[in-house]
Amino acid sequence: MHTRIWVTVKPRAKIEAVTQIAAGEYRVSVHASPQNGKANQAIIELLARHFCVPKSAIKIVRGHSARKKQISIG
């Protein structure tokens, strides 16, 4: 079963964190810059640790180059 959530990304943050804003909506802060997909990779790694799933279970469905992304987990 796949769960879909919305994520608002804050790249180049001082502290990496995952914060739940509302049901199905999170704010993710990562150290990485948004160049060459580095921030997207950091988001996947951070969400995998947060939800205790393998990195292969996290997929970016929409918003690859936007701050607001739809993520599929599972």
Image (tube, grey):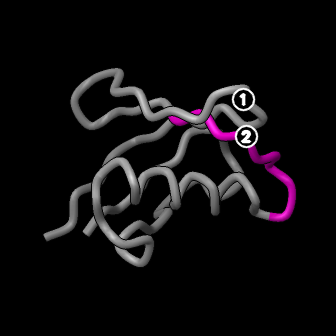
Residue drawn at 26 percent across, 37 percent down = 24
Residue 26 vs residue 44: left or right? left
Quarter occupied by residue 55: bottom left
Left or right of residue 71, residue 3 in this image: left
As measured in the structure, the alpha-carbon distance from the residue carrying label 2 to the one carrying label 1 is: 5 Å
Residue type at numbered disc 1: Ala
Residues under numbered marks 2 and 1 in contact, where contact means CB atoms less than 8 Å apart: yes
Q: Is residue 59 left or right of residue 68?
A: left
Where is 58 relative to 5, above or below?
below
Residue 33 part of the magenta segment: yes
Helix, strand or loop at mark 2: loop
Q: Residue at x 64, y 63 (%)?
A: 41
Residue stretch in magenta: 28-36
Residue 47, position as x, y percentages in the image? 43, 52
Which residue is more in the foreground, 64 or 31?
A: 31
Q: Circle 1 is placed at which residue position?
A: 13
Does the magenta portion include 40? Answer: no
Q: Residue furthest right?
A: 35
Outermost residue, top direction? 21
Query: Residue 63: x, y in percent?
Result: 59, 53
Question: Which mark is on residue 31?
Answer: 2
What type is the residue that disc 2 sits on? His
Query: What residue is rendered at 39% in x and 55% in y?
Result: 49
Image vertical order of residue 56 relative to residue 24, above or below:
below
Q: Position of residue 57 (x, y in %)?
A: 35, 73
Q: Residue furthest bottom?
A: 56
Q: Residue at x 60, y 37 (%)?
A: 9
Callout 1 secondary element: loop
Quadrant where the C terminus is found in the figure: bottom left
Q: Which quarter of the rendered picture does the N terminus lie within?
A: bottom left
Residue 35 is situated, as x and y percent measured from the top left of the image, at 86, 55
User: 10 Å neighbourhood of mark 1: few (<14), some, or many (≥20)?
Assistant: some
